[in-house]
């Protein structure tokens, strides 16, 4: 199957087709998933992306990238599918000597960097969302490096993080989860992990140790592998990969900004009760960290006049076609300074606390403006554009950041429960 349809996009549910060839890696597919069969294939069913395969001796391609129906004849619905995957995942994660050794070496290397103040700079490119790199310091504001930390997910399952980066939490006694490390034997597709990545408001670095022996897992390997976020092997498969939720893209973006242009704005559509709760919680975070209202403006917008209704409509057009389903008369604007690079401790801490809250709060559809007063001229364009003006194309030359950052977890689960799983193993593959 050469084409599929993305379940969620700024254009709305089941509105964005995707070609298998446009997906560059398993990590890329995991970020865009879930996919379903296109309309001409009959009732919607989940599909997964399958990468190209090559002959190890000749280098010739043996199989093209394609989509494959997801299911093995046992999973009739999404809930059962995830239960099966969870069991399979647990078996695969049963710790081998290589996994244990890698985790120990990387933990020790992180502790060494933390003690020496060296930090851990990472970088990541997502050309579908920005022409500028995302970058940060995984150990910024960190106090503790701890292996085997369990985190709760919205999917009624716990997730065991191989290594967690923890820091002090100004809002309470529970440590703040700032980053994570996953050690994998391959960057293979896993539906549970694809959905997990939609819930994490921190950078997650995935390290592939497939094919490595105990002898190859050394201190020198640990020192180098943590920074290899942009280096590919001969078959274009990264050994180290950074997962970022779109919601935290603005926090870690490297596109240049100065002065007043450093202010950016998050647009939040949610039920009225949720917006009121968020306003109170955001104000508490702002006050606790010592920010003034002018430095972090929390602005409810109500359609009490024609002018305000027009403003809300224009903000909704930024977020996407379905904004009225969340709240057609009210939204919340959060305007604050972008962090000034990877070492800006105060602004990064503020963003981490705020974005964790937005991702955790029920029912929030979140959009973005890289400048508060920017005009959304091209409604169909999913990303904000900037850089030099291209006179021939009549648009700016660079992608900056997405206009839509997050869909509520509850929406994701509700939609996915209504999609068929493959009921027969006869549909395992149809290239």
Image (cartoon, rainbow, N blue to C red):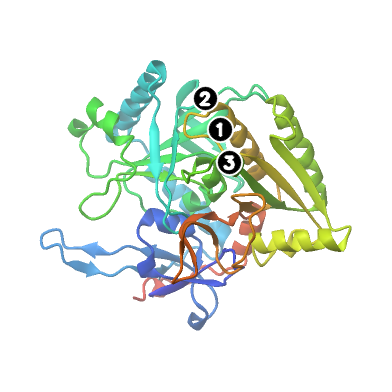
Q: Nearer the viewer, mark 3 or mark 1?
A: 3
Check if mark 1's residue and mark 2's residue have beta carbons within 8 Å.
yes
Q: Is residue 324 left or right of residue 187?
A: right
Q: Residue at x 59, y 57 (%)?
A: 403
Q: Nearer the viewer, mark 1 or mark 2?
A: 1
N-term-proximal mark, 3 vs 1: 3
Q: Residue furthest right?
A: 304
The crowding category of the residue bearing disc 2, from other C-alpha atoms within 10 Å (few below 14, some 14 to 19, many at least 20), is many
At mark 2, the secondary structure is loop
Q: Is residue 94 left or right of residue 236?
A: right
Residue denoted by label 1: 348
Query: Residue 131 location, x and y as percent?
Result: 42, 54
- How far separated are the C-alphas under marks 3 and 1? 14 Å
- How far separated are the C-alphas under marks 2 and 3? 22 Å
Q: Looking at the image, can residue 218 be seen?
A: no
At mark 1, the secondary structure is helix
Of residues 156 and 405, which is closer to you in this image? 405
Of residues 72 and 132, which is closer to you in this image? 132
At mark 3, the secondary structure is helix
| Quadrant of image for the C terminus | bottom left
Q: Residue furthest left?
A: 57
Q: Is residue 151 left or right of residue 133?
A: right
Residue denoted by label 2: 141
Q: Quadrant of residue 325?
A: bottom right
């Amino acid at each position: 199957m050469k084409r599929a349809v993305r379940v969620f996009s700024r254009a709305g549910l089941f509105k964005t087709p995707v070609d298998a060839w446009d997906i560059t890696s398993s990590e890329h597919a995991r970020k865009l998933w879930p996919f379903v069969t296109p309309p001409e294939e009959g009732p919607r069913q989940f599909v997964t992306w399958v990468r190209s395969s090559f002959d190890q001796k000749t280098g010739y391609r043996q199989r093209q990238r394609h989509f494959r129906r997801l299911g093995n004849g046992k999973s009739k619905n999404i809930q059962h599918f995830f239960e099966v995957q969870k069991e399979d995942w647990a078996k695969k994660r049963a710790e081998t000597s290589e996994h244990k050794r890698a985790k120990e070496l990387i933990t020790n290397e992180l502790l060494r960097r933390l003690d020496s103040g060296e930090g851990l700079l990472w970088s990541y490119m997502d050309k579908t969302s920005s022409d500028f790199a995302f970058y940060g310091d995984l150990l910024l504001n960190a106090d503790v490096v701890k292996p085997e930390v369990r985190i709760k997910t919205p999917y009624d399952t716990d997730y065991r993080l191989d290594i967690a980066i923890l820091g002090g939490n100004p809002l309470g006694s529970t440590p703040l989860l700032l980053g994570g490390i996953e050690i994998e034997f391959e960057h293979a597709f896993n539906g549970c992990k694809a959905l997990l990545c939609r819930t994490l408001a921190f950078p997650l670095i995935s390290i592939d140790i497939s094919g490595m022996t105990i002898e190859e897992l050394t201190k020198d390997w640990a020192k180098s592998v943590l920074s290899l976020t942009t280096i590919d092997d001969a078959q274009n498969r990264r050994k180290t990969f950074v997962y970022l939720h779109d919601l935290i893209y603005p926090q870690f973006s490297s596109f240049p900004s100065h002065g007043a242009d450093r202010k950016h704005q998050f647009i939040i559509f949610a039920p009225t009760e949720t917006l009121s709760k968020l306003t109170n919680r955001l104000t508490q975070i702002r006050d606790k960290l010592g920010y003034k209202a002018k430095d972090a403006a929390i602005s409810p917008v109500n359609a009490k006049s024609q002018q305000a209704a027009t403003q809300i409509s224009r903000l909704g057009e930024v977020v996407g076609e379905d904004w009225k389903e969340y709240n057609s008369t009210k939204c919340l604007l959060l305007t604050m300074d972008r962090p000034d690079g990877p070492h800006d401790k105060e602004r990064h801490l503020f963003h981490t606390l705020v974005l964790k809250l937005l991702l955790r709060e029920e029912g929030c559809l979140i959009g973005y403006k890289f400048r508060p007063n920017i005009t959304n001229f091209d409604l169909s364009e999913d990303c904000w554009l900037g850089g030099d003006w291209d006179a021939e194309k009549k648009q700016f030359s660079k992608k900056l950041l997405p206009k839509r950052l997050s869909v509520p977890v509850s929406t994701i689960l509700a939609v996915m429960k209504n999609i068929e799983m493959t009921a027969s193993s006869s549909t395992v593959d149809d290239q």
